[in-house]
Amino acid sequence: FSIIFIIFSIIWILLLGFATPLALASGFIFGQWLGTIISLVSLTAGCTLLYLLAQIYFKEIIIKHIEPKIKKYKKLFNENEFLYFTIFRFCGGAGIPFCIQNILPVIFNMKIINYFFASLIGLTPVLFITNALGQGIKNVLSKNQNIYFIDIISDPNIFMPIAAFITIILISIFIKKFFFK
């Protein structure tokens, strides 16, 4: 079943789908740890394939439409593409939709190996937290009792991932403020 999930996830990303529903589903289905591994492998593979397709077939279009908006970051990324793309992924892409995040490095002509590993490392914290949230939702629903909003929010399996996610958002704001002025 995990192979089917991985194949579906890769196709989903190639069709420009969002990552959050996949990560929640993998946490719900496979649990926090295995779900994180499965979603990390599948999303990184899907993102890398999408990047390759964009690099080969849509490079001119992407450069024409997106480069003028982020021209000031091009020099920064070209200095150390791996570090800055890892930070970019860790920060959730600075609010940029996931499908655009995946094709954005076409502008910087990023090496595929750097893209793959920067995505793998940068996506890990958010996917771990999202999978934990998916497992927490499954645990709350499996209690077969009346479910109240306060019970859901106060459950440690849900509260802790949300607190960790808020922490990542705060760190992202800090990084964005000092590194991407």
Image: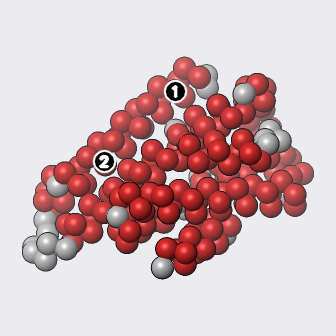
Q: Is residue 146 visible?
A: yes
The residue carrying mark 2 is 162
Q: CA distance from mark 2 to mark 1?
A: 20 Å
Task: Residue 168: name its quadrant.
Answer: top left
Give left or right: position of 172 versus 50: left
Q: Residue at x 26, y 46 (%)?
A: 160
Tell me where residue 84 appears, x and y as whole percent. 65, 32
Image coordinates of residue 73 in percent, x first then y, are 72, 30
**At which x and y percent is residue 146?**
10, 73
Confirm whether residue 66 shows in the render. Answer: no
Instruction: Report the front residue among 168 and 95.
Output: 168
Judge the density around disc 2: few (<14), some (14-19), many (≥20) Cα neighbours within 10 Å: some
Whether label 2 touches label 1, CB < 8 Å: no
Q: In this rendering, is residue 4 above or below 14? A: below
Q: Is residue 141 left or right of residue 48?
A: left
Mark 1 Cα shell of 10 Å, populated few (<14), some (14-19), many (≥20): some
**Mark 1, residue position:** 175
Q: Is residue 171 above or below residue 22?
A: above
Which comes before the other along the chain, label 2 or label 1? 2
Taking the spot 75% from the left edge, 55% from the top edge, the residue there is: 51
Identified by mark 1, the residue type is Ile
Residue found at x 68% / y 67%:
14
Name the one closer to the observer, 178 or 69.
Answer: 178
Image quadrant of residue 81?
Answer: top right
Q: Position of residue 115 (x, y in %)?
A: 70, 45
Q: Is residue 34 left or right of residue 176?
A: left
The residue at the point 45 percent across, 48 percent down is 126
Amino acid type indicated by mark 2: Ile
> With respect to residue 1, does 84 lie above or below?
above
Quarter placement of the C terminus = top right
